[in-house]
Amino acid sequence: MANTTFKVVGISTFKGQRKVRYAQDLKRIIALHKCGNTDIEMFELPHAMTKEAALAYALDNNLFTVDKTVVKMQQIHTGKSYKEVVEDIKQRKSKRSITAEELVALAQ
């Protein structure tokens, strides 16, 4: 199981908890949306990666919209303090991801 790789990494909110999500394709967004997840952000990876590598790639490339969960993951990943992470985030350029609603609308 430790060698399992994924082609998509993302983050979503389910019952008030933010969680990192891994999948083989972006169709996972539809399943997450149907199950009641909100604030879904999923990104294709350049190649199949393990969970650890996928999360590191997402954090290194600033893929996720910033919230407290992402700041905490960034702290763990980089070893930086909360203040340093927030300063790094403030200097980012915004990235656009497709929302679950937009993907569902496209699928119809």
Image (spheres, rainbow, N blue to C red):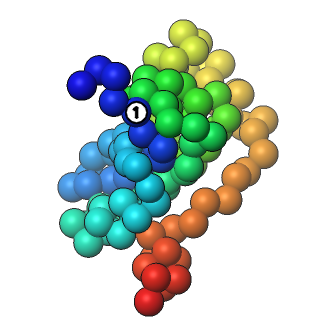
User: What is the quadrant of the N terminus in the image?
Assistant: top left
Q: Quadrant of residue 86?
A: top right
Q: Is residue 71 visible?
A: no
- Dot 1 lies on which element? loop
Picture residue at 49% right of the left edge, 74% below the top:
103
Q: Nearer the viewer, residue 65 or 57?
A: 57
Q: In the displayed structure, would residue 34 be above or below residue 76?
A: below
Count of marks placed on residues: 1
Name, please, the residue furthest toward the top: 79
Q: Nearer the viewer, residue 48 or 89?
A: 48
Crowd rating for badge 1 (residues with CA inside 10 Å; few <14, some 14–19, many 20+):
some
User: What is the quadrant of the C terminus in the image?
Assistant: bottom left
Q: Is residue 30 left or right of residue 93?
A: left
Picture residue at 62% right of the left edge, 24% below the top:
85
Q: Nearer the viewer, residue 63 or 86?
A: 63
Q: Is residue 36 left or right of residue 93?
A: left
| Callout 1 amino acid | Thr
Q: Quadrant of residue 22?
A: top left
The picture places residue 57, in percent across and down from the top left corner, at 58, 30
Q: Is residue 2 visible?
A: yes
Name, please, the residue furthest toward the bottom: 108
Picture residue at 46% right of the left edge, 82% below the top:
107
Q: Quadrant of residue 78?
A: top right
Name the residue tied to disc 1: 5
Q: In the displayed structure, would residue 40 be above or below residue 71?
A: below
Q: Nearer the viewer, residue 92 or 82?
A: 92
The picture places residue 11, in percent across and down from the top left corner, at 42, 47
Picture residue at 46% right of the left edge, 60% below the top:
26
The picture places residue 104, in percent across and down from the top left corner, at 43, 79
